[in-house]
Image: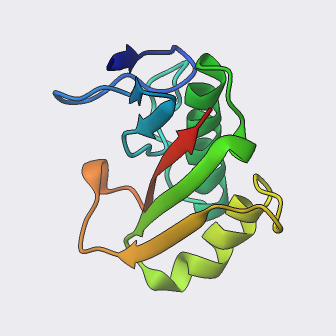
Amino acid sequence: MKKIITTKNAPAPIGPYSQAVLNGGMLYTSGQIAIDPKTGALALGDIKAETKLVMENLKGILSEVGMTFENVLKTSIFISDMENFSKINEVYATYFNEVTAPARETVEVANLPKYVNVEISLIASL
């Protein structure tokens, strides 16, 4: 049965979608961008800080359902400039154990919501 997941530890949706959906022990998050959930402010400028906030937003969603990054099976990373890949990857790597890291793809796109530089979504399992 589908359960909509909502937490104050991640930004509220800016459109007709949920922060995440839990179904049959599987968690599917919407893409997270660098919006501070406490203030609603967009945090742009430094790509490492932007990526850290994105990852913290994902952590907030995972925590809401009793999961951690160890539960993550797959991530999708969308970036506006592949030149930022190594900096994004540097921050991203601090959230995962390299031996048990999830599958992932990283795709450069023409644009992202609110003109952010990085958006990440994930799939996790209990």
* Left or right: 37, with 92 as reference point: left
Above or below — where is 105 with respect to 27? below
Above or below — where is 84 with respect to 37? below
Above or below — where is 64 with respect to 100? above
Q: How is the image coloured?
A: rainbow
Q: Position of residue 85 (x, y in %)?
A: 57, 78
* Left or right: 87, with 20 as reference point: right
Using the rendered view, name the quadrant where residue 86 is placed: bottom right
The quadrant of the rendering that contains the N terminus is: top left
Q: Position of residue 14 (x, y in %)?
A: 25, 29
Using the rendered view, name the quadrant where residue 61 is placed: top right
Camera-side residue of 4 and 58:
4
Q: Position of residue 2 (x, y in %)?
A: 32, 20
**Residue pictured at 48% horizontal, 34% vertical:** 27
User: Which residue in the rendered view is the most extreme toward the bottom?
Assistant: 83
* Left or right: 89, with 116 as reference point: right
**Residue pictured at 67% horizontal, 29% vertical:** 67
Above or below — where is 97 with respect to 35? below
Camera-side residue of 32 and 1:
1
Camera-side residue of 27 and 105:
27
